[in-house]
Image (cartoon, rainbow, N blue to C red):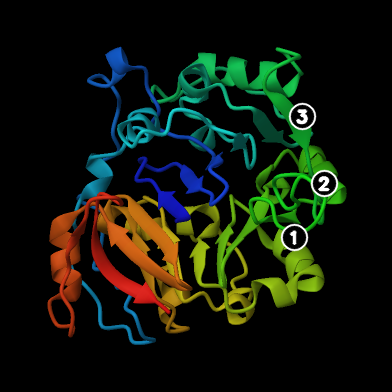
Amino acid sequence: MPRVHFLNVNDGDCSIIEHLSGHVTVIDVSAAKKPAEKVAAATANYSMLESILKSFSEHSKTAGVYGNFNRSEYPDDPIAYLKDRGLTSVFRFISTHPDMDHLDGIKPFFEAFSPTNFWDTDNTKELGEFTEGRYDPADWEFYTSLRDGKPTNNPKRLVLHSGAAGKYFNQDEKGEGGGDGLQILAPTPELVTAANEAGDWNDSSYVVLYRTGNKRILFSGDSHDETWEHILDKWEKQVTGVDVLIAPHHGRDSGRDYEFLDIVKPRLTLFGNAPSEHLAYDEWNSRDLLFVTNNQAGTVILNVADNNLDVFVNHKPFAESFVKDRDYETYYDANSRGWFIGRLK
């Protein structure tokens, strides 16, 4: 069955799609370390900043789970996570945009999995000295070597834009519809050019809609206002009423316009980790839109089968709190390695 993993990786991004074809797509990476580096890996600590949260329920009610579950202090390493699940190869790696919280550990990750395809943007970003101890300059050097076409044989670097079609990601081997169900909504060449000129690469982010069965999951990178103007102008029908939204910019407020939520109206939104003062809870709460954060749930796993989308989390106490006053119980699914919290029919 198709399965999506939204990993708990500190204040970065990493999502994994197991496609029905058998291909594995990884979108961004963070907190990936070589085995010897795991003990020394830095972890974010938001325990004193995280406020009371509301979360996802099966219906459009905001009956919430309250409290700080503190999962940001226990991130998953994407390398170990994939290997522990028997996922030993990656067909495509999508770098949504060139910010280090989406590239943290890219060098050891590529050394471990040698992705066949690498989706990138024609950005011109350059970094000065690294001032944050969390990031390894070797990751940026490795990324720029990929961006500059080195090595030349593997992985295959693809620069794709809104509306692109191609074998395997949204076409089958005959060039017909299907493939791995990935539709590219952004960026456009114009958005990338503007981002390069402004020196702000959020609006150069890939935004990718994943379709499987009758379910739609929207991966948003760090997309900002200009990107969403394009999406709502070009792709409004495709994004209206999606099942799951991976919140843009991890769910951070970031001084943006949130009117796109009035169209997208996700049934469930997944937020990454960030201090509560930086997360846009009010924008979702005011629209009665439901969400789960990595800090509550840890890693979130989405299983799609028989046109149902089942939601699991890898933090049992959160799952138990979530179902406490509902008419169903949590259970552990060995295949997902997670605890059930709800179903989107």
Above or below, 137 relative to 233: above
Near-viewer residue (232 or 1): 1
SS type, badge 3? loop
Q: Which mark is residue 91?
A: none
Residue 15, percent from left and from top: 47, 46
Q: Is residue 72 left or right of residue 134?
A: left
In this rendering, the count of numbered labels is 3
The crowd level at tag 2 (other Cα within 10 Å; few <14, some 14-19, many 20+) is some
Residue at the spot of label 3: 124
Q: Are marks 1 and 2 in contact (CB under 8 Å)?
A: yes
* Residue for badge 1: 226
- Sort mark 3 into few (<14), some (14-19) or many (20+) by Cα contacts within 10 Å: some
Mark sitting earlier along the chain (3/2): 3
Do the CB atoms of the residues marked 1 and 3 lie less than 8 Å apart?
no
- Which image quarter: residue 239? bottom right
The first of marks 1 and 2 along the sequence is 2
In what element is the residue under mark 1? helix
Residue at the spot 54% in from the left edge and 49% down from the top edge:
19
Mark 2 is on which residue type?
Ala
Residue visible at 45% across and 64% down in the picture: 304
**Cα distance between the residues tagged 3 and 2:** 11 Å
Name the one closer to the observer, 170 or 237: 170
